[in-house]
Amino acid sequence: MQGSGIPIWFFIGLVLTIYGAMILGYGTYEWISGNYPATVQMTYLHTPVWWGGLLAALGAFYVIKFRPGREK
């Protein structure tokens, strides 16, 4: 089969970027407002900010690397 169209990795990167931005936004809101869940330990690490940023960066990498119309 001849490979044509948009690579699946582009869509995976798009989903990772969207989810990462959502988690990063929530983590930033949580950090600024101080509304932490009462039962969560070690909230000072701000894991939603780190994981959201990591997902968004990884997703952006895939979107840029596998964008449609890129010459091979």
Image (cartoon, rainbow, N blue to C red):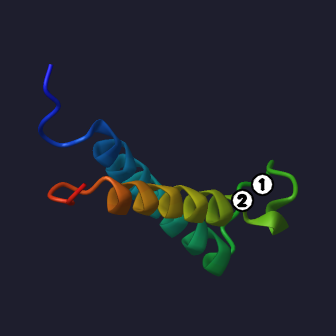
- Residue flagged by tag 2: what amino acid is it? Thr
Circle 2 sits on which residue?
47
Image location (x, y in percent) of residue 67? 25, 57
Element class at badge 1? loop
Of 9 and 57, which appears nearest the observer? 9
Image location (x, y in percent) of residue 15? 36, 47
Image location (x, y in percent) of residue 11? 29, 44
- Residue flagged by tag 1: what amino acid is it? Ala
Query: Is residue 38 in view from this perspective?
Result: yes
Image location (x, y in percent) of residue 61? 45, 61
Q: Is residue 29 left or right of residue 45?
A: left
Crowdedness of circle 2 by 10 Å Cα count: few (<14), some, many (20+)? some
Quarter of the figure that contains the N terminus = top left
Residue sitting at the far bottom: 32
Circle 1 sits on which residue?
38
Quarter of the figure that contains the C terminus = bottom left
When asked about the image quadrant of residue 48, the answer is bottom right
